[in-house]
Image (cartoon, coloured by chain):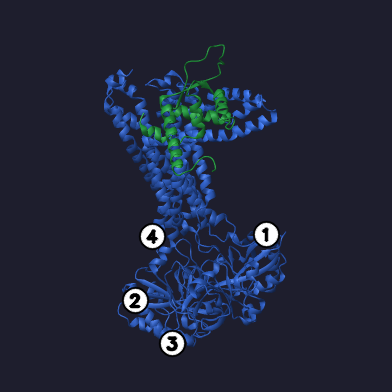
Chain colours: A green, B blue
């Protein structure tokens, strides 16, 4: 994948970045993504179902995620569910976004800016 | 609750719904646990609505990208479709904008449908009122809330720069209130202005051009024809009455002397109907009044009735027909554009059948395919629509010549957006219908056949539809070609009409002598002597003469004739046009003398009243007799015929004219004939206008330094003006007809190319079995001609009907004119053959082996 392909998607919309994070460690289905994002952000970000699936649709088209072929054990599974896993391209984009954000924070620090009011 | 959510999900595009619907439902069900029904319901709406809109937008953008890419791959299709839309919509918008402006739009006055024109009516004739009858009608009629009168005039304006000739209207003070007009600045006339007669209202235009838009002009004194007038008001910009040339309104007043002669008809009367009074009731009342007046004045008012027309109907049938014919032509073009677009779309659908079948087989839902085709139609219509705006903007001024100058409206019609939207919608619907129907059929049955390379599914039915569309195209173009041809023939016939005088090398100007400065023959004589004498002395000038009104410019000035005093009647049958002339007028226009003598300088008031009449006058009153020395009563006096000249077309090329009577200029003696004082100078000269005109200006300036010259025109321009509106219409019509021809040829070519490619196998088999290539070529050609013929036959029938409808425009050309029909049909056949050539050649070059191998 060319670096321009990655750069063309930056900056990522916050929802997209969160969804990528949610599927980084394991394949998740839609509702699980919502729950994961909610837990990780301490309830601060609650993705609505519509926003989630519209993002998923776009991310599938962009090749950031794919539908997972492996499914959990039948006892745990609901056949309506679809599981999504991150692609190497998705990982590259997530990394690039991280770099962009880190760079941004570093620049702000260099100017003496801190998150807390001093 | 779940049902509600599922219903809500229908807002999403169905592709999105089928993909994620179940999961959305699951997420909704799981989340619902932590809230009450109302809260989760509201939250669901807040989630679904914006996301659904966004999802639709995503799909649309995607389709748009896909469509743009597709159209770029087939630019021929895209450009043709856009041009067809632009042409159809643009031409219609232009034609109907102008037609609406002239025919339908209400006049720019309050309650315009209550404004009526009043006329005196004698059998077969409708004419202006005499002041005497007007005064009585106004006093007695109860049907009108207010009534006013006017007549057109022209004045010499001095005292603000160069002397200027300005078109003016003399109006009664109550004309403005009748129309419901308001002043832009200052005031309108009051009854008191009439008594003094020195007040003036000027048009917004004149105020801008002559007085620089300065409001201090109110109260200023200017000189009209040498007398002082005070400007009291400025009319608003959109007020034009009785026509858009008027720059000045003066008051008119009737003296007892004016009111006496009831045969002197020159004023136009406008009345405003009282609310609740119908036209018929008003007409009945006026007829009753006219009857009473006829009893009181049995000689002058003999057979004089009354008639009423709407002010908005002041439009000649010819002007109306010219416009309607144009609207018909543009409708033909719209029909043709729709048929052509339908054909293009069907061809495209056929070409894309495989693609659609592949997509359907890969699981693209019908909705996605339909959406994409709709997007394509919308994109094409939008691009065509934008192009059509330019077509309309270019076309409307071309058609503006068809707005008669006699209408009390501003001159430039604007592009009417309503018409444009209507035409664009029609084209869009056509495009959609012809692209969607096959697409839906294809997506409904994603058969293997569609996927096969040699698919011919649905070919038969579609080909029939396409044949019908091509037939319609040919039909529309035949109608246009024949109509245009008939009008061209009519034009030729008009241009071949002999006006009765020699048109070439004649310059005309107006020097209207103001009154009262030049109110007697004696006062005028030095001016005529000086101007005509100086002109005659100029090398290169063959003859110069004055006349009251130029033929074709002023068509009125018609007076009753009575050859036998005992049976004086007023009717259409016994009238003649009255003109006073100077002796050289006949030589200036080279009107031939048939018998007797011309008018001479010696024919003045010390001699008897003499007249030269035209041939038709003699034919009517003294057929077979010697006319010289005959006497007749005309224009208030007994006149003796001293000569006979050829007839001229006073009323223009298209109308029959009354017989003409010419009187010597030195015998304009009565005050009521003051309007006939010769003012139009006619000069026959080999000098170019550029040389003659400065010399003429000097001559007139030497005769009277305050005398303006106006209306400089050659006689050729006057004749050309006769056919100008026709020419404008014809040009547009011819362009439309040619475009139609090209479009239908393109249609035939497209259809035949398609059939040939569809039938290449059949053709291959035929050739393998021994058919010669020339025979194959003939077969394709025959198919094209049959198609054309199927359009030509109903087209010719329609054209004949159209020709009958516009017979009034045809100046006697037979609406079934064989030559026109033959040439139009011939042209159509030739174009068809051209359209067939390439497909026919291609068919004859089909390689039998490769065609059969594909099987």
Residue at mark 3 to residue at mark 4: CA–CA distance: 40 Å
Q: Is residue B756 left or right of residue B791?
A: left
Dot 4 crowding, Cα within 10 Å, few <14, some 14–19, many 20+: few
Judge whether residue B472 can be spotted in this image.
Answer: no
Q: Are marks 3 and 4 on the same chain?
A: yes
State the image coordinates of residue B560 (x, y, percent, origin top left): 56, 72
Sequence-earlier tag: 4 or 1 = 1
Label 2: which secondary element = helix
Dividing the image into 4 quarters, which one contains the C terminus of chain B? top left
Residue at mark 2 to residue at mark 4: CA–CA distance: 29 Å
Label 4: which secondary element = helix
Q: Which mark is residue B496?
A: 4
State the image coordinates of residue B60 (x, y, percent, origin top left): 49, 35
| Residue position for label 3 | B526
Residue at mark 1 to residue at mark 3: CA–CA distance: 52 Å
Chain letter of the residue beneath label 4 in the structure image: B
Which label sits in the foreground, 2 or 3? 2
Residue at mark 2 to residue at mark 1: CA–CA distance: 54 Å
Q: Are marks 2 and 4 on the same chain?
A: yes
Sequence-earlier tag: 3 or 4 = 4
Q: Is residue B783 above or below residue A84?
A: below
Q: Which mark is residue B279?
A: 1
Closer to the camera in the image, B726 or B73 = B73
Label 1: which secondary element = helix
State the image coordinates of residue B371 (x, y, percent, origin top left): 50, 32
Label 3: which secondary element = helix
Sequence-earlier tag: 2 or 1 = 1
Which label sits in the foreground, 4 or 1? 1
Residue at mark 2 to residue at mark 3: CA–CA distance: 22 Å
Q: Which mark is residue B692?
A: 2
Sequence-earlier tag: 2 or 3 = 3
């Amino acid at each position: 994948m060319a670096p321009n392909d990655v750069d063309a998607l930056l900056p990522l919309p916050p929802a997209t970045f969160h969804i990528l994070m949610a599927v980084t460690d394991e394949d998740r289905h839609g509702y699980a993504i919502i729950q994961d994002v909610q837990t990780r952000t301490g309830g601060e970000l609650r993705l609505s179902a519509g926003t989630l699936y519209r993002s998923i649709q776009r991310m599938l088209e962009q090749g950031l995620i794919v539908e997972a072929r492996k499914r959990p054990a039948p006892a745990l599974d609901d056949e309506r569910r679809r599981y999504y896993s991150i692609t190497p391209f998705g990982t590259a984009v997530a990394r690039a976004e991280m770099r962009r954000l880190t760079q941004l924070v570093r620049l702000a620090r260099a100017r003496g800016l801190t998150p807390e009011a001093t | 609750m779940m049902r509600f959510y599922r219903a809500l999900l229908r807002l999403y595009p169905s592709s999105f719904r089928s993909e994620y619907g179940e999961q959305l439902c699951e997420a909704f069900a799981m989340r619902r646990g932590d809230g009450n029904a109302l809260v989760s319901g509201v939250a669901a709406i807040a989630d679904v609505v914006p996301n659904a809109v966004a999802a639709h937008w995503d799909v649309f953008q995607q389709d748009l990208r896909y469509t743009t890419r597709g159209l770029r791959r087939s630019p021929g299709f895209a450009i043709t479709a856009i041009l067809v839309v632009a042409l159809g919509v643009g031409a219609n918008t232009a034609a109907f904008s102008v037609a609406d402006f002239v025919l339908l739009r209400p006049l720019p006055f309050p309650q315009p449908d209550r404004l009526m024109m009043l006329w005196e009516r004698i059998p077969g004739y409708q004419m202006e009122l005499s002041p005497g009858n007007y005064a009585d009608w106004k006093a007695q009629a109860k049907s009108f809330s207010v009534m006013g009168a006017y007549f057109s005039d022209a004045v010499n304006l001095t005292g603000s720069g160069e002397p200027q000739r300005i078109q003016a209207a003399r109006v009664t003070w109550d004309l403005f209130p009748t129309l419901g007009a308001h002043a832009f600045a200052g005031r309108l006339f009051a009854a008191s202005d009439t008594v003094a007669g020195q007040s003036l209202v000027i048009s917004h235009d004149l105020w801008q051009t002559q007085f620089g838009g300065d409001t201090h002009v109110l109260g200023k004194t200017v000189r009209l024809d040498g007398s002082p007038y005070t400007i009291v008001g400025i009319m608003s910009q959109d007020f034009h009455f009785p026509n858009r040339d008027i720059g000045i309104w003066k008051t008119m007043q009737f003296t007892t002397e004016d009111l006496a002669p009831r045969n002197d008809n020159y004023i136009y009367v406008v009345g405003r109907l009282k609310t609740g009074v119908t036209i018929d009731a008003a007409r009945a009342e006026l007829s009753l009044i006219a009857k009473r007046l006829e009893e009181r004045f049995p000689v002058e008012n003999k057979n004089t009735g009354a008639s009423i027309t709407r002010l908005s109907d002041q439009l000649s049938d010819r002007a109306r027909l010219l416009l309607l014919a144009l609207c018909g032509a543009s409708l033909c073009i719209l029909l043709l554009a729709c048929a052509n677009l339908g054909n293009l779309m069907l061809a495209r659908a056929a070409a894309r059948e495989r693609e659609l079948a592949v997509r359907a087989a890969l699981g693209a839902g019908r909705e996605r395919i339909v959406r994409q085709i709709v997007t394509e139609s919308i994109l094409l219509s939008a691009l065509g629509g934008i192009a059509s705006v330019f077509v309309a903007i270019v076309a409307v001024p071309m058609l503006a010549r068809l707005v008669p100058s006699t209408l009390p409206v501003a001159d430039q019609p604007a592009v009417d957006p309503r018409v444009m939207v209507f035409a664009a919608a029609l084209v869009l619907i056509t495009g959609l219908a012809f692209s969607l129907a096959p697409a839906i059929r294809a997506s409904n049955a994603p058969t293997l056949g569609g996927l096969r390379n040699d698919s011919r599914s649905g070919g038969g039915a579609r080909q029939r539809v396409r044949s019908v569309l091509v037939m319609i195209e040919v039909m529309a173009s035949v109608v246009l070609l024949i109509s245009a041809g008939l009008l061209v023939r009519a034009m030729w016939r008009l241009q071949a009409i002999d006006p009765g005088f020699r048109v070439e090398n004649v310059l005309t100007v107006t020097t209207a002598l103001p009154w009262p400065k030049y109110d007697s023959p004696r006062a005028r004589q030095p001016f005529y002597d000086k101007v005509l004498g100086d002109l005659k002395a100029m090398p290169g000038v063959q003859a110069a003469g004055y006349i009251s009104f130029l033929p074709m410019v002023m068509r009125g000035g018609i007076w009753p004739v009575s050859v036998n005093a005992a049976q004086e009647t007023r009717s259409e049958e016994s009238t003649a046009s009255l003109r006073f002339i100077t002796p050289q007028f006949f030589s200036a226009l080279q009107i031939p003398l048939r018998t007797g003598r011309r008018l001479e300088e010696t024919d003045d008031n010390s001699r008897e009243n003499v007249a030269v009449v035209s041939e038709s006058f003699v034919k009517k009153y003294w057929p077979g007799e010697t006319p010289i020395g005959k006497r007749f009563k005309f224009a208030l006096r007994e006149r003796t015929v001293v000569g006979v000249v050829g007839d001229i077309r006073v009323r223009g090329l298209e109308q029959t004219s009354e017989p003409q009577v010419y009187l010597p200029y030195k015998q304009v003696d009565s005050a009521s004939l003051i309007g006939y004082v010769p003012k139009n100078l006619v000069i026959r000269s080999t000098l170019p206008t550029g040389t003659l005109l400065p010399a003429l200006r000097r001559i007139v300036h030497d005769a009277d330094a305050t005398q303006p010259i106006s209306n400089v025109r050659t006689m050729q321009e006057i004749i050309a003006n006769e056919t100008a509106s026709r020419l404008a219409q014809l040009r547009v019509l011819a362009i439309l007809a040619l475009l139609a021809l090209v479009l239908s040829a393109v249609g035939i070519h497209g259809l035949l190319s398609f059939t040939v490619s569809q039938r290449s196998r059949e053709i291959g088999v035929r050739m393998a079995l021994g058919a010669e290539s020339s025979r194959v070529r003939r077969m394709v050609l025959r198919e094209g001609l049959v198609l054309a013929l199927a359009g030509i036959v109903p087209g010719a029938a329609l054209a004949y009907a159209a020709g009958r409808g516009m017979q009034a425009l045809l100046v006697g050309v037979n609406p079934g004119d064989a030559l026109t029909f033959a040439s139009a049909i011939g042209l159509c056949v030739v174009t068809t053959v051209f359209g067939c050539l390439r497909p026919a050649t291609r068919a004859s070059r089909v390689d039998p082996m490769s065609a059969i191998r594909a099987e």
